[in-house]
Amino acid sequence: MKRKTTGIIGERLAADFLTKQGYEIIETNFRCKEGEVDIIAKDGDYLVFVEVRAKNNLTFGSPEESVTARKKDHLRSVAARYQQTHECLPQQWRIDFVAVELDRAGNTRRIGVIKNAVDGD
């Protein structure tokens, strides 16, 4: 399975998973000059920016291990830009990761969320 296909499947599975966990999806694939975030949602009183990492091969580590310090900085910047350009948002916010592991056929082996995976400062 190609990397792009893995990513598309992972994002779809993540959105479904988050919805079942009680998140309300607001927007997907938000892009701005600072970068991109896969999913923006509400979880209770929180605005949540979600980075999805999907892998079908663990040779180079787990999905969680694939998020670099640079990506975390980009996510903070995208979150700040989103809040500056949108109104009526919850005051509290966080960045979550959703890790998706697929088999070579595209079936889910594991999916999970790490809440507040990136500090907001």
Image: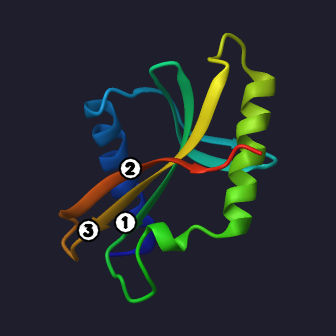
Q: Determine crowd level at label 2: few under 14, some 14-19, many 20+ residues with C-alpha closer than 10 A.
A: some
How far separated are the C-alphas under marks 3 and 1? 8 Å
When asked about the image quadrant of residue 1, the answer is bottom left
Residue 89 horizontal side relative to residue 59, left or right: right
Say which residue appears at 18% left-offset and 72% top-offset: 105
Mark 3: amino acid: Leu
Q: Quadrant of residue 6?
A: bottom left
In this picture, residue 84 sits left or right of residue 91: right
- For marks 2 and 3, the one nearer the N-term is 3
| Crowding at mark 1 (Cα within 10 Å: few <14, some 14-19, many 20+) | many
Residue depicted at 72% across the width and 20% down the height: 86
Point out which mark residue 113 bears: 2
Mark identifier at residue 102: 3
- Relative to 38, does residue 9 appear above or below in the rendering? below
Q: Amino acid at mark 2?
A: Val
The answer to whether the residue labelled 3 contacts the one labelled 1, judged by CB atoms less than 8 Å apart, is: yes
Label 3 Cα crowd, 10 Å radius (few <14 / some 14-19 / many 20+): many
